[in-house]
Image (cartoon, helix red, strand yellow):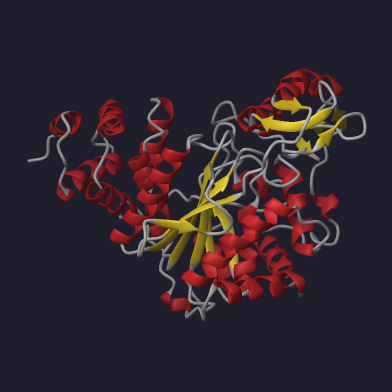
């Protein structure tokens, strides 16, 4: 006999729920037989009591089965189905890069991406800044784009893990988003529903990350990798630094412009290149497309140098409604803000610290993010030439260039943005952008490149 309040009570009191109990509760999410108040109570109980790996796996499987599960066998794809997912950051445009790179190396990337959340940007919002790009195509069109371009990046469909959509909406308004088991199940249910062979997680840590502290970030990475293994999905996680903006831009159209410049070889910021390469290496290894990291890195460099990765991105964009000549004339199809204002530092010196979350909130204030779910996104606004840690700033080098709807709008955020940067008389010690690598077998974690983040 299924009584929702008894399951809530048991979890509230710290009991471990069985797979059948969790599955019954998730069916109630899906069919509406469980009230929103009960879902909220369940989420709060999990928030405070947590879940074992077995419980989290059961929740992942139940939410995956709540809707459509994509099948790819009928397409006879000649390569593995691989994906990458990030926990969110500011200026993080790596999804736009690794998908076409991996496609150019023989993988197929059916990426179900998200929109911006809080201070973090969303891949779907970025792609929608391309004139004509359809982020919600029919499933048949999505599958066709994956087959022909090797990659396609779209938003979550209504039929993909719908129970997660309902649970997430309630978590968002009940202060229960920051639950490691619920985050794990939310991510993996959608990724498994996409029919993947392998998943690489980019788990951000630092002032601009969803979790700023290293301990919780590492626990999230381990949870995702271990639950994925229990649920039958190969996964690896990399912890990457989000104590500064990733790349030189933050804001939807500006980040697409930087992604195009990266893929065509016009400009590749070093930290962005390091993270992109590391993620793509892991994807190739998971898919059996390279024997070791050196071979994978060589293949990635060749895909970029030959233009094959850029061509895959252009083909994906065109097949999903974008222009055919995006790479040649990106400025023609990406909105530009009418007011462009350089922001000087409060005093000359070196950038010694950045409150990256505040930087992200400045973009939201400009209109480049949402305060409410129904808000309209201004794709043109954001920041370019963002100064990294250690940069010498002053009259010759601004903290950033603000792209706004008007000079007044730029002035409204200028003080807040300037205060996000700490200026010192000497450059600070710099931490590597790549931290621990978390894998399901062998040691709990090792180092992907460089040293672990401190």
Residue 279 in the image: state x and y as whole percent.
57, 60
Q: Is residue 267 above or below residue 253?
A: below
Give the residue drawn at x 70%, y 36%. 428
Q: In percent of the image, x 80 and y 32: which residue is there?
A: 399
Q: How many marks?
A: 0
The correct choice, above or below, for 264 with respect to 343 in the image is below
x and y, in percent, of residue 222 in the image: 38, 50
On the question of residue 130 being in view, the answer is no
Q: Is residue 362 above or below residue 277?
A: above
- Camera-nearest residue between 209 and 4: 209
253 sits left or right of 239 in the view:
right
From the viewer's perspective, is residue 72 above or below residue 52?
below
- Measuring 74% from the left and 40% from the top, which residue is drawn there? 388
Q: Quadrant of the N terminus?
A: top left
Q: Position of residue 239 (x, y in %)?
A: 51, 49
Residue 165 found in image quarter: top left
Q: State whether residue 441 appears in this view.
A: yes
Q: Taking 24 as reference, is 91 left or right?
A: right
Residue ranking furthest to the right: 396
The picture quadrant where one finds residue 195 is bottom left
Q: Residue 219: x percent and y percent?
A: 38, 44
In this rendering, position of residue 19 left or right of residue 446: left
């Amino acid at each position: 006999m299924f009584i929702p309040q008894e399951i809530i009570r048991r979890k509230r009191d710290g009991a471990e729920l069985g797979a059948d109990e969790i599955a019954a509760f998730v069916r109630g999410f899906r069919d509406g037989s469980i009230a929103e108040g009960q879902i909220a109570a369940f989420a709060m109980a999990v928030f405070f009591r947590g879940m074992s790996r077995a419980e989290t796996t059961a929740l992942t499987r139940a939410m995956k089965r709540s809707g459509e599960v994509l099948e790819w066998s009928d397409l006879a794809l000649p390569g593995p189905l691989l994906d990458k997912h990030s926990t969110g950051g500011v200026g993080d445009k790596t999804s736009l890069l690794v998908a076409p790179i991996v496609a150019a190396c023989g993988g197929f990337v059916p990426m179900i991406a998200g929109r911006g959340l809080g201070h973090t940007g969303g891949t779907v919002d970025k792609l929608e800044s391309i004139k004509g790009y359809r982020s919600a195509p029919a499933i048949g069109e999505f599958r066709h784009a994956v087959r022909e371009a090797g990659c396609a990046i779209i938003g979550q469909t209504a039929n993909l893990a719908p129970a997660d959509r309902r649970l997430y909406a309630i978590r968002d308004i009940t202060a229960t988003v920051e639950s490691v088991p619920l985050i794990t199940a939310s991510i993996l249910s959608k990724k498994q529903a996409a029919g993947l062979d392998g998943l690489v997680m980019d788990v951000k840590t630092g002032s601009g990350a969803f979790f700023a502290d290293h301990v919780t970030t590492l626990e999230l990475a381990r949870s995702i990798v271990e639950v994925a293994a229990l649920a039958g999905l190969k996964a690896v996680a990399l912890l990457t630094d989000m104590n500064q903006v990733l790349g030189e831009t933050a804001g939807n159209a500006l980040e697409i412009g930087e992604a195009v410049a990266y893929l065509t070889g016009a400009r590749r910021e070093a930290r962005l290149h390091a993270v992109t390469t590391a993620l793509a290496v892991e994807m190739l290894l998971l898919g059996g497309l390279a024997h070791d990291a050196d071979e994978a890195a060589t293949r990635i460099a060749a895909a970029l140098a030959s233009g094959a990765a850029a061509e895959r991105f252009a083909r994906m964009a065109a097949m999903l409604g974008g222009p055919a000549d995006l790479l040649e004339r990106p400025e023609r199809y990406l909105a530009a803000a009418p007011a462009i204002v350089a922001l000087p530092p409060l005093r000359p010196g070196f950038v010694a610290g950045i409150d990256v979350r505040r930087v992200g909130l400045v973009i939201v204030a400009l209109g480049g993010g949402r305060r409410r779910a129904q808000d309209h996104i201004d794709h043109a606004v954001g920041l370019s030439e963002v100064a990294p840690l250690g940069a010498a700033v002053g009259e010759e080098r601004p903290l950033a260039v603000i792209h706004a709807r008007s000079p007044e709008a730029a002035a409204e955020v200028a003080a807040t943005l300037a205060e996000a940067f700490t200026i010192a008389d000497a450059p600070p010690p710099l931490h590597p952008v790549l931290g621990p690598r978390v894998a399901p077998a062998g040691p709990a974690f090792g180092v992907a490149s460089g040293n672990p983040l401190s």
